[in-house]
Structure formats: C-alpha cells, structure tokens
C-alpha cells in the first residue's frame, strides 16, 4: 500500500514530439513510474519523489533495494552520482522536461510511504501527521509496532493507536543522534 504523493505526474500544455522518436509522447508523463523502473534496473529502491516548482525540479530519494532494517551501509555520494547520471539519460529519452535533478539518500529522518517501509522500520520511533484530528491532535510521535494492508499501529505514551492508510498524511523516522 502506498499513500499518494501530492503530485505523481507532470502535465504539459500540449503533446510534443520527443527527440529521436517518431511518435508523440502523451501529454502527461508518469515521472514516478519512469524513475521507479530506472532504479529497479540499477539495484536501488525509490523511497520518495518530490516534484516542487510545478514539476520543474525533481528530487529523488533512494535506498539500496535489498536493505533490511536500518542499514549501516547507507547511500553514498557515488550511488547518488550513478543514479543521477542514469536518470538524466532516461528522462531525456522519455522527454521529461525539468530544470534541476537532485538525487539524495533518504536521510536520518526518512519518509515512510510504502507498506514495506513500515514493516522494515517496526520498532523504530516515528513522527506522523494524520489528515483528520484524533483526540484533538494531528501529530503523533511513538514507536511503530507493525503494519498490514489495513493500516499500522504505533505506541504513544504506553497506549497503542491504530491508524488506517487513508488517515495518514505524512510519516517520518525520528532520527537517533
């Protein structure tokens, strides 16, 4: 289960002819699908994708595809450079227009978006923001107990709280320094 990104596609004013191709590319390009398939081929996982500035700036957060738990061997500058170089070529071929591409590790306060992320980081402290207030609160910090297709559970101040995926606005790990 993936809770939706605010912007998953980038829209164009009109269809255009991609360089080196004889067919017209659709007016809406699914940037997330392009990035995901590229990362799969390189052995990385897409953690998050941000398209601020009306999609003119692409921010891609990556991790190792086979990482389990809190990986000690995180993403290095060389990994980001390799992915950035490959994405530049792929995005040009697919006709995705952008002004700036940024490839980064998810960081210590990584975002949790997918069910496997929630399962992988069970037992870790998380900060989450829900869409509709519960008991007068929208922001919770607690220990992630587990996750399933129906939702996830966190322990806050000794009490277990269960949330559905539709309730979730944003979830991040709380960094341990």
Image (cartoon, grey):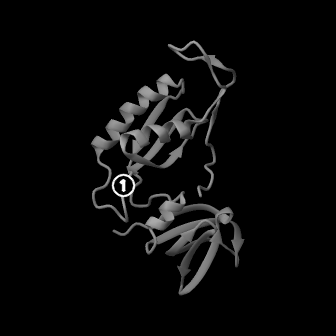
Q: Residue at x 70, y 71 (%)?
A: 133
Q: Residue at x 44, y 67 (%)?
A: 121
List x then y, in percent, for residue 91.
48, 28
Q: Residue at x 27, y 57 (%)?
A: 73
* Disc 1 element: loop
The quadrant of the rendering that contains the N terminus is bottom right
Which image quadrant for residue 17? top right
Q: Residues within 10 Å of mark 1 (few under 14, many from 20)?
A: few
Q: Is residue 135 above or below residue 18?
A: below
Which image quadrant for residue 95? top right
Q: Residue at x 61, y 42 (%)?
A: 8
Q: Is residue 86 above or below residue 6?
A: above
Q: Is residue 22 above or below residue 35?
A: above
List x then y, in percent, for residue 157.
54, 85
List x then y, in percent, for residue 135.
70, 79
Q: Which residue is mark 1?
A: 66
What is the count of numbered marks? 1
List x then y, in percent, for residue 66.
36, 55
Decide which of 61, 19 is in the foreground and name it: 19
Which image quadrant for residue 149? bottom right
Query: In the picture provided, is 138 more to the left or to the right than 175?
Result: right
Instruction: Name the outermost residue toward the bottom.
Output: 158
Query: In the picture provided, is 60 more to the left or to the right than 148?
Result: left
Decide which of 148, 138 is in the foreground and name it: 148
The quadrant of the rendering that contains the C terminus is bottom left
């Amino acid at each position: 289960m993936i809770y939706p990104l605010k912007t998953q596609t980038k829209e164009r004013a009109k269809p255009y002819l991609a360089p080196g191709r004889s067919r017209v590319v659709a007016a809406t390009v699914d940037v997330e699908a392009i990035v995901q398939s590229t990362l799969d081929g390189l052995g990385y996982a897409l953690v998050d994708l941000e398209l601020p500035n009306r999609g003119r700036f692409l921010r891609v957060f990556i991790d190792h595809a086979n990482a389990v738990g809190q990986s000690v061997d995180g993403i290095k500058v060389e990994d980001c450079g390799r992915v950035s170089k490959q994405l530049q070529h792929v995005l040009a071929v697919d006709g995705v227009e952008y002004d700036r591409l940024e490839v980064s590790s998810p960081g210590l306060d990584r975002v949790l978006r997918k069910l496997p992320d929630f399962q992988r980081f069970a037992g870790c402290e998380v900060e989450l923001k829900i869409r509709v207030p519960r008991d007068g609160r929208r922001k919770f910090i607690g220990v992630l107990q587990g996750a399933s297709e129906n939702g996830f559970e966190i322990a806050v101040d000794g009490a277990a709280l269960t949330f559905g995926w539709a309730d979730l606005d944003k979830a991040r790990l709380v960094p341990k320094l």
